Image: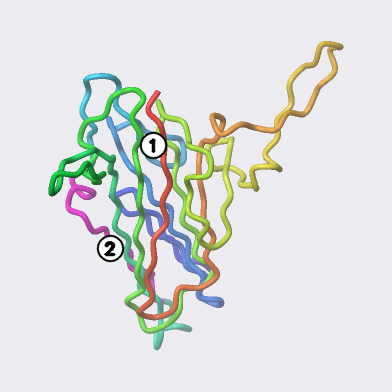
Amino acid sequence: MPVSIYMQTGIFVSEASKCGSCRISSTYAHNKRKHKHHKEHQAPQQGEKMKRTSSLLAGTVGLLLAAMPLSAWAQPKVAITIKAEKEVSVTAKGKQVKKRIAAKGVQPGEEIIYTLNYVNSGTDAAKDVIISDPIPAGTSYIPGSASETGDLSFSIDKGKTFRKPTLLTYEVKGSTGKPEKKVASPDDYTDVRWTIPQVPAGGKGSVNFKVKVK
């Protein structure tokens, strides 16, 4: 039986004891909007500052994979830190350079960069790690911005199913009245997901993606 833990921070972890696999679903809670299956993070409207839960402001969210008797001697221990940033131009030594700062306040048209850093400080490898994150309401995913770490896929049904972009389709009624299949555009994406085959003991990495505020 898999062991599941739901953290109040919005991080969900489950580990299958036989194969040592784990799932990490990182979510945000902007404006305290709730989704049926997870907390949804929402980009602020014009003039409104981005709100984050106190746990995310703390910087590090610990994810302890529950130990099962069969794997008590060696187990993965994965932690993740989450950042929401934007790029600004600053003057350094007489030159204009771009710098990333915390996205505490954003305006329509601005881009937000979400970075999820993960580390396995346990004594065993974490296998088949899945990191998924919803696209914030009020924003649209920027095509090609998600890091190509592991197996990258997207959802258009709020995380119920994930597929490659070319396989994300939906049906609409055509001019003849018959259903026609359409390929979803990046504006239709609701979630992004990475499947990482293995994070070794002591291993770490990061994934990221960008959105544009509507």
Q: Which mark is residue 160?
A: none
Instruction: Tell me if residue 20 comes above or below residue 82 in the rendering.
Output: below
Instruction: Tell me if residue 4 comes above or below residue 19 in the rendering.
Output: above
Tell whether position 58 is magenta: yes
Amino acid found under the numbered disc labelled 2: Gly
Q: Position of residue 98 (x, y in %)?
A: 26, 44
Horizontal side of 45 relative to 20 (left or right) equals: left
Residue under label 2, please give it: 62
**Element type where label 1 sits in the image:** loop
Instruction: Tell me if residue 76 comes above or below residue 9 in the rendering.
Output: below
Colour convention of the picture: rainbow
Counting labels gives 2
* Residue located at (42% from left, 82% from top): 124
Q: Position of residue 143 (x, y in %)?
A: 53, 39
Q: Position of residue 115 (x, y in %)?
A: 35, 51
Horizontal side of 167 relative to 43 (left or right) equals: right
Q: As rendered, which of 79 and 145 lies closer to the eye?
A: 145
- Mark pair 1, 2: CA separation: 20 Å
When asked about the image quadrant of residue 40, the answer is top left
Residue under label 1, please give it: 40
Read off the magenta span. 54-67
